[in-house]
Amino acid sequence: MNKQTPCPWWLRKRILLPLALLVGLAVAGVIAFENSDTSLIIIYNETGHPLPPLLVRACDQTRTFATLADQESIRIGLAPRGDEGAVHVELGTEPPWRWDGPLVKPSGGGRVTVRLLPGGQAEAFEDISWWRRVWD
């Protein structure tokens, strides 16, 4: 009859599983912290109808979108380059509808949420990533 030799203590499941969980949690935390430095602009269409072509400009970076359906949103992650600048939204209507919002930095975890409302109104909210609030 073969007698099994016991595993070394570091290869046992009650050691390996919690250790793997801790390492995975640490890696996920580092990845989340690194990504928290990206600034975001989020635009919601709450006008009640689809929007024509949309141009968004901030920090010397420009993005265009063909259309934006009602109750749809877009999310723009800013590259960490350029200077601090105001969020500029422009609709491809005749005459063009323009709106300038709050200042945003291209990095630092800032988030600007813009809600486009009926009647050509817009409102903006600013926030900072909670990771950056804690560590900065």
Image (cartoon, rainbow, N blue to C red):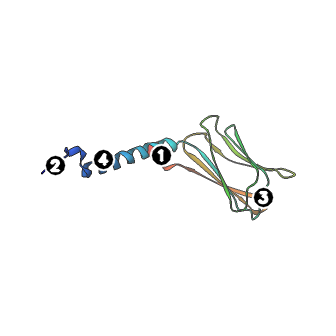
Q: Position of residue 18 (x, y in %)?
A: 30, 51
Give the label on residue 11, or none.
none
- Seen at 30% across and 47% down, the residue is 19
Is disc 2 placed on a helix, strand or loop? Answer: loop
User: Which residue type does callout 3 highlight?
Assistant: Gly
Image location of residue 24, percent across then percent down:
38, 47
Q: Which three-letter amino acid code belongs to the residue tagged 1?
A: Ala
Select label 1 or label 3 by which is in front. Answer: 1
Residue at (51, 43) in percent of width and height = 35
What kind of residue is marked 2?
Gln
Residue identified by numbered label 1: 32
Residue 84 x %, y %: 64, 38
Q: Dot 3 surroundings within 10 Å: few (below 14), some, or many (20 or more)?
A: few
The residue to which callout 4 is attached is 19
Which residue is at the far bottom? Answer: 48
Callout in the foreground (2, 4):
2
Is residue 103 found left or right of 25 in the rendered image? right
Q: Work out how far the residue at label 1 is from the one at label 4, CA to CA, in angstroms.
A: 20 Å
In the picture of the structure, the residue carrying the numbered disc 3 is 120
Q: Are marks 1 and 3 in contact (CB under 8 Å)?
A: no
